[in-house]
Image (cartoon, grey):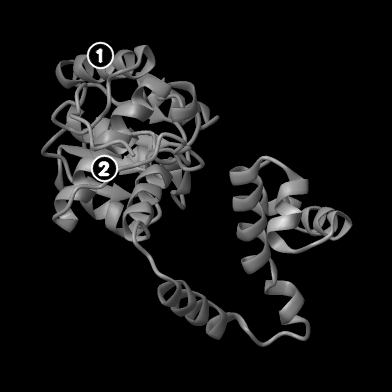
């Protein structure tokens, strides 16, 4: 087990700058603090777009683009505005026109470049923050940051084993959730697992073939843990008391849930 490690390479906004890519993004954001131009920050969910936007304009109100009426109101009453997920705006053309009309500086975030000529002209600068899978140096720092945060929240030191595989499906969002779940489940007992399954199944049951539909909740983790622990289907079949053909069938049935 590895103890929580000191965290480095984290600036005041909690944007990680351990990798070259994130360091370059942070330099661009630092430059934008003084340029006073409109900018678009693109990237996947959980890569740090909001953190950099708030670093660039720390006193600006932050509004989700999907909240159209609220966004229009904020544009009418502020000189600087941060717009999150601008691709979700009901009418992006009106948003741009209102920002121009009221001389509002905008820092916006989006999943990707918008592909709208008027929008692209409005933003003098655009840059992309790469996903965490492309900047693994940042992953290690983020992991330690989240471990320390969770340890402080729970009042006890959290440790992760050396085989911990970070979930980067939603970048920092999924990684933090994974660390938190690992902390909660670190000393989980059978009764806790059964209570969780009970609550889950109580909400889900109601179909015509639910036994078969939810059997993987038991079989997949049992087989997956066994394969990882014993490294051998033959040995696992003996441990589980199954013949090899039955085990192979179970592995095939649960292959979408197994990380082999």
Question: Depth check: 245 or 124 in front?
Answer: 245
Q: Please tell me whether mark 1 sits on a helix, a strand or a loop.
A: helix
The disc label shown at residue 147, or none? 2
Q: Is residue 22 left or right of residue 233?
A: left
Question: Depth check: 58 or 171 in front?
Answer: 171
Where is residue 44? Give x, y as percent. Answer: 47, 36
Q: Is residue 20 left or right of residue 133?
A: left
Residue farthest to the left, as pictured: 59
Q: Look at mark 1 in the image and give the residue it sits on.
A: 27
The disc label shown at residue 73, or none? none
Question: Depth check: 99 or 167 in front?
Answer: 167
Question: Depth check: 65 or 232 in front?
Answer: 232
Q: Is residue 86 left or right of residue 184?
A: right
Q: Please tell me whether mark 2 sits on a helix, a strand or a loop.
A: helix
Q: Which residue is found at the position 23% from the left and 54% from the top?
A: 73
Where is residue 139? Give x, y as percent. Answer: 37, 29
Where is residue 121? Give x, y as percent. Answer: 42, 22
**Figure check: 151 above or below 44:** below
> How many badges with numbers are in the image?
2
**Figure check: 34 above or below 187:** above
């Amino acid at each position: 087990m590895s103890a929580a490690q000191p965290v480095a390479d984290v600036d005041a906004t909690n944007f990680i700058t351990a990798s070259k890519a994130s360091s370059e993004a942070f330099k661009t954001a630092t430059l934008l603090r003084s340029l006073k131009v409109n900018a678009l920050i693109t990237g996947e969910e959980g890569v740090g777009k909001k953190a950099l936007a708030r670093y660039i304009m720390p006193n600006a109100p932050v509004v989700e683009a999907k909240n159209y009426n609220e966004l229009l109101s904020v544009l009418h009453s502020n000189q600087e505005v941060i717009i999150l997920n601008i691709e979700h705006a009901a009418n992006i053309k009106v948003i741009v026109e209102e920002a121009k009309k009221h001389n509002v500086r905008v820092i916006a975030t989006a999943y990707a470049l918008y592909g709208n000529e008027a929008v692209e002209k409005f933003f003098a600068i655009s840059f992309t923050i790469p996903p965490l899978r492309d900047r693994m140096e940042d992953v290690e720092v983020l992991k330690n940051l989240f471990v320390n945060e969770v340890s402080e929240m729970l009042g006890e030191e959290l440790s992760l084993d050396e085989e911990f595989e970070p979930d980067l499906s939603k970048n920092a969002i999924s990684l933090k959730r994974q660390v938190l779940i690992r902390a909660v489940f670190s000393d989980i007992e059978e009764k806790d697992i059964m209570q969780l399954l009970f609550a889950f199944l109580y909400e889900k049951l109601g179909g015509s073939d639910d036994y078969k539909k939810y059997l993987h909740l038991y079989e997949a983790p049992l087989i997956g843990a066994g394969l990882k622990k014993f490294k051998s289907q033959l040995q696992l079949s003996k441990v589980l008391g199954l013949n090899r053909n039955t085990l192979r069938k179970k592995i095939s049935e649960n292959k979408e849930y197994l990380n082999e």
